[in-house]
């Protein structure tokens, strides 16, 4: 097989390994060898469908072992994996397909008829493995001569929205993904004896490029839950020794009396990220279990940047130290000059984990990726005297709810088109379960009476469920400064 930088790094030594890779409780168990075999069949299918190196393979499917095989197959074929949130509506998916121009689009059997008019060749794959993708791959050989790819070749595109409402495709190289996974394996002490309880979605960096890649590299195994299910989590915790989650996982576990010290006495590591965790959750978790959650900091464009230490103080309210090989600097948001230790400013990141730029958006790339390699994160923070990084806010009006990044501009645009609405402002408010919840302040046209419940209902066809406002406040006017800019901090103070 030809040298394929990422695939060889993840699975190069385990092509015939009979050890267990993952188990779907009550359904199936997959060895490393069986995963490599299916990825070989799928890679052969991609080549038969005229997929060339650099072509995009867009995927909007339920979480499954077969979806992991498709990810590996795409890499082996030299193509670019493009996972899409399963909650996106048809209207939202259209933008990604137009922007990325994939050669192949894989979706559920139920959604397949909705995309019979697009240019990409469409296949179906369901959460139980059904669909015509595997039917077509079933006649293909398992052996596949991997297409050679270098460290800087494009491996994946993950879309992350901007405050303008237009999504941007973050281009991630083979080395971006492999170098970060290797660093995490070492920093978090993973080895082949670990069993990860995997309940994260696999359409973003946390569940796919952090959790899954770390397991693949080490030859460890994972219990692969289709989604977060409280009963399944509690049932499977005795069979695992590590868990990666978002704060919502931990608040929901703590709300159940079955989650106690005895249940998790054998656990080695609990990791949390994708959203800030409240200090009270940290403290309650440690009091209940005797374990201290390890919080870390990452983003779509960079994978993981910092982490609290495995050994040493895991400081509540901090996301720890820069990972080995990663640099963090705090800069003045106006001038870009580096600030002294302890001062609050823009968090910038440089290292082998930092993405190549935004797909087909060179102007946007130039604005956020400096010529010296530092990426301007949009997050505000400071480094304390002991070197711990603290995230203090966001320059952008991003809302992170249940681990999902939500950008207000898209929601505001949809609200403003509704009958009777003059204008709106969307913002985040604290939520013990989700970290943040989406809230909207809506100003009606004079003489119109708006019903908050009906406003949310009208948004359901055009917005993914996790983007829908949990709270809608109908008000007379939006607070503005002297320049006319809406003061969302005032809205958060009033309604948060």
Image (spheres, rainbow, N blue to C red):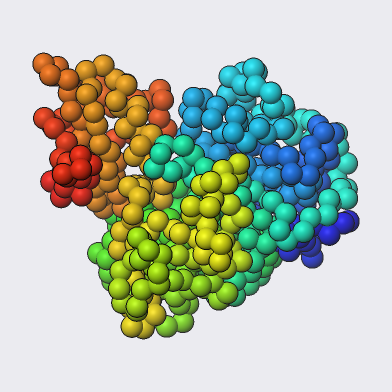
Q: How far from the left and from the top, in percent, is residue 452? A: 20, 27
Front-most of 257 and 89?
A: 89
Look at the picture and state if 366 lies above or below 267.
Answer: above
Kindly identify the residue that appears in the image at 74 percent across and 44 percent down: 54
Residue at 22% across, 18% down:
420
Q: Nearer the viewer, residue 372 or 12?
A: 372
Q: Position of residue 81 (x, y in %)?
A: 66, 44
Residue at screen point 54% across, 71% down:
326
Left or right: 349 in relation to 444: right
Q: Is residue 222 above or below residue 400?
A: below
In the rendered image, residue 268, in percent from the top left (x then y), is placed at: 49, 72
For this rendering, which residue is in front, 241 or 167?
167
Which quadrant, please, contains the N terminus?
bottom right
Is residue 364 in view?
yes
Q: Is residue 243 left or right of residue 408?
A: right
Q: On the image, which quarter does residue 221 sit in?
A: bottom right
- Determine whether, in the image, residue 163 is placed left or right of residue 353: left
Horizontally, is 456 left or right of 228 in the view? left
Tell me the residue at 62%/36% (across/down): 100
Give the x, y percent position of residue 42: 78, 40
């Amino acid at each position: 097989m030809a040298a394929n930088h990422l695939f060889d790094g993840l699975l190069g030594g385990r092509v015939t390994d009979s050890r267990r890779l993952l188990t779907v409780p009550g359904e199936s168990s997959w060895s490393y060898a069986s995963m490599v075999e299916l990825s070989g069949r799928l890679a052969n299918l991609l080549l038969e469908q005229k997929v060339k190196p650099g072509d995009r393979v867009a995927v909007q499917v339920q979480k499954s072992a077969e979806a992991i095989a498709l990810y590996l197959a795409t890499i082996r074929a030299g193509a670019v994996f493009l996972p899409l949130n399963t909650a996106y509506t048809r209207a939202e998916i259209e933008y990604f397909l137009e922007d990325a121009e994939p050669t192949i689009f894989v979706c559920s059997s139920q959604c397949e008829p909705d995309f019979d008019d697009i240019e990409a060749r469409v296949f179906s794959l369901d959460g139980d493995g059904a669909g015509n993708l595997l039917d077509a791959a079933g006649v293909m050989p398992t052996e596949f001569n991997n297409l050679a790819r270098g460290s800087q070749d494009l491996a994946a595109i993950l879309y992350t929205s901007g405050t303008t409402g237009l999504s941007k495709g973050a281009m991630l190289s083979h080395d971006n993904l492999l170098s970060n996974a290797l660093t995490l394996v070492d920093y978090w002490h993973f080895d082949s004896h670990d069993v990860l309880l995997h309940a994260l979605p696999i359409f973003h960096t946390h569940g796919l490029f952090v959790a899954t890649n770390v397991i693949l590299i080490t030859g460890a195994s994972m219990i692969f839950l289709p989604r977060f299910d409280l009963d399944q989590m509690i049932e499977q915790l005795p069979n695992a020794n590590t868990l990666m989650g978002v704060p919502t996982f931990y608040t929901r576990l703590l709300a159940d009396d079955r989650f106690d010290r005895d249940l998790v006495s054998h656990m080695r590591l609990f990791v949390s990220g994708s959203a800030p965790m409240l200090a009270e959750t940290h403290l309650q978790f440690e009091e209940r279990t005797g374990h201290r959650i390890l919080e870390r900091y990452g983003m779509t464009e960079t994978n993981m940047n910092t982490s609290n230490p495995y050994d040493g103080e895991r400081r509540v309210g901090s996301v720890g130290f820069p990972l080995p090989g990663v640099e963090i600097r705090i800069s003045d948001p106006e001038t870009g000059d580096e600030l002294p230790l302890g001062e609050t400013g823009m968090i910038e990141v440089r290292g082998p984990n930092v993405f190549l730029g935004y797909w087909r958006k060179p102007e946007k790339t130039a604005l956020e990726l400096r010529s010296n390699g530092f990426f301007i994160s949009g997050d505000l923070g400071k480094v304390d005297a002991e070197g711990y990084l603290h995230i203090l806010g966001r320059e952008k009006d991003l809302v992170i709810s249940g681990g999902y990044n939500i950008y207000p501009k898209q929601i505001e645009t949809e609200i403003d088109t509704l009958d009777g609405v003059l204008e709106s402002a969307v913002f985040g408010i604290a939520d013990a379960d989700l970290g943040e919840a989406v809230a909207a302040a809506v100003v009606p046209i004079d003489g119109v009476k708006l019903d908050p419940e009906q406003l949310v209902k009208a948004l359901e066809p055009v917005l993914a469920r996790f983007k829908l406002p949990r709270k809608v406040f109908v008000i007379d006017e939006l607070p503005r400064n002297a320049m006319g800019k809406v003061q969302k901090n005032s809205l958060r103070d009033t309604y948060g």
